[in-house]
Amino acid sequence: MAIVSISLNDTILKEIDRIQNAFGYSGRSEVIRTGARLLISESKEKERLTGDINSILLLIHSQGAENAVSKIKHKFEDVTNTQIHSHLREDKCLEIFVLDGDADRIKEMVRLFQTSRKMDYVKLIVA
């Protein structure tokens, strides 16, 4: 097995330790491998999406990221049926997008949110 070095901030490292203890993983590496497997599986599911699809996109982000959300969402009005914005506690916001349209457009929208580095959580649910 290859050894890969990564840098993690204290918050992520504490969460990895918490998950390790809560679920009984043998070490941090196993937690990270599990996370990587989940990401790969989710990515493969998205790659298989074609044609017109119905889906829900969930985002959680800090209030300071609202400009980044607006910039991306305006590029995808053609596939957005509904958007709900709600303020959560601790300076967080929840965005719910009801999406309908071309799978490639929706996948691009999700990719932009995932790679923006301003989102705490991004999840696409396909009907």
Image (spheres, rainbow, N blue to C red):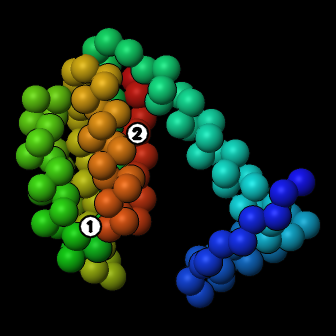
Say which residue appears at 82% left-offset and 64% top-offset: 3
Give x and y (percent) for residue 48: 49, 20
Label 2 secondary element: strand
Give x and y (percent) for residue 124: 40, 39
Say which residue appears at 67% left-offset and 51% top-offset: 36
- Asked whether 113 or 121 is in front, the reply is 113
- In this rendering, the answer to whether 53 lies above or below 62 is above
Name the residue that disc number 1 marks: 93
Label 1 secondary element: strand
Visible residue check, residue 21:
yes
In the image, which is nearer the foreground, mark 2 or mark 1? 2
Give x and y (percent) for residue 115: 37, 56
How packed is label 2: few (under 14 Cα within 10 Å), some, or many (20 or more)?
some
> Sequence-wise, which precedes: disc 2 or disc 1?
1
Identify the disc placed on residue 68.
Answer: none
Amino acid type at circle 1 is Cys
Visible residue check, residue 88:
no
Quadrant position of the C terminus in the picture? top left
Q: Residue furthest top?
A: 51
Name the residue that disc number 2 marks: 124
Q: Is residue 17 left or right of residue 100?
A: right
- Asked whether 107 or 2 is in front, the reply is 2
- In this rendering, the answer to whether 52 lies above or below 88 is above
Say which residue appears at 47% left-offset and 30% top-offset: 46
Quadrant position of the N terminus in the picture? bottom right
For the image, the number of numbered tags is 2
Amino acid type at circle 2 is Leu
